[in-house]
Amino acid sequence: MRLPRSIAWFWPLLIWLVAATAQPAGAAGPGPATGPTMPLAGGDWHVVLAAGDNAQPVFDNATAALRRFLIDTGVPAANIHRLSANPDPADPSIEPATGARLVARIAGLRPRPGERCLIFITSHGQQAEGLYLARSGEILPPSALAQALSAGCGAVPTVAIVSGCYSGSFAAYPMRAPNRAILTAARADRPSFGCQADRTYTFYDQCLLAVLPRALTWRDVHRDTSACVGRSERTLKALPSQPQAWFGKAAGQLTVR
């Protein structure tokens, strides 16, 4: 399937407009963290979960399962925003996963100092472009996600998980910041696997969900998820997807709970 190219000029304008109109008192500012005193654990997560395509159920299944996990571990349901490409979701609280709504939702999170951001986006990927958003027929590029995170999460500890083919581009600049931990499903030049209609989750998402309940830090999550993905791919004799990660100097030991 040939995916559309991203609308590069549109993203900075949209994120600037959201940032200019969403500045509650006491919210974290847009600058990156620079010191080692950032809290590694504790504080509520502010969460955006997005399924970028609905051609297969695997993407919505993953966001639903991750939402359940987070609520079970004590994250307030009101802090979790779920988006979908499905035009008629069963849950009326699920928002449309258009480019505009996704970046606006992230840019509008505004956690306070001591709180944290978690972003999970799962979809098909386009090499050297980004992740596909079927609802609006757009590609979300790393630059747009980076700007939305800066606007919405500022200097608080932030975890961004990007699941899709060629998603390793999201672990490079401009996504990198000292307060961010970034996990991706594949190398920038490699596909990932498991987008069949008869599967519950993609390989990466299934492994991620299996690892999260026992992981202490997000480094543990990346290590154990990568090992799990590798085992699944070897059964297919597939080219290894090689999940990627990057940890800013203030987020290297950021904990899952």
Image (cartoon, grey):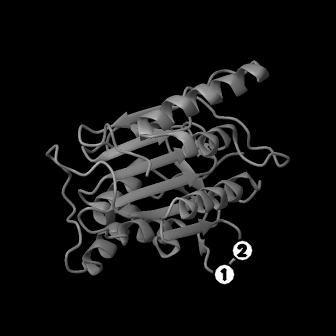
Above or below for 89 versus 127: below
* Residue at the image point whose x is 42% and y is 48% from the top: 142
Q: What element carries label 2?
A: loop
Total number of numbered labels? Answer: 2
User: Are the residues at dot 1 and dot 2 in contact (C-beta closer than 8 Å)?
Assistant: yes
Name the foreground residue: 109 vs 223: 223
Task: Report whether residue 170 is seen.
Answer: no
Q: Is mark 1 on a helix, strand or loop?
A: loop
Mark 2, Cα crowd under 10 Å, few <14 / some 14-19 / many 20+, is some
Q: Where is residue 37 in the image (x, y as percent from the top left)?
A: 16, 48
Classify residue 170 as left or right of residue 17.
right
Q: Where is residue 185 in the image (x, y as percent from the top left)?
A: 56, 37
Classify residue 240 as left or right of residue 31.
right
Q: Find residue 135 and report its image quarter.
A: bottom right
Classify residue 109 as left or right of residue 65.
left
Q: Mark 2 points at which residue?
A: 89
Q: Where is residue 159 in the image (x, y as percent from the top left)?
A: 40, 49
* Residue at the image point whose x is 58% and y is 29% from the top: 190
Q: Position of residue 73 (x, y in %)?
A: 52, 59
Q: Mark 1 points at which residue?
A: 92
Above or below for 223 versus 3: above
- Label 1 amino acid? Pro
Q: In which quarter of the image is the N terminus?
A: top right
Classify residue 150 as left or right of residue 121.
left
* Residue at the image point whose x is 68% and y is 23% from the top: 231
- Label 2 amino acid? Pro
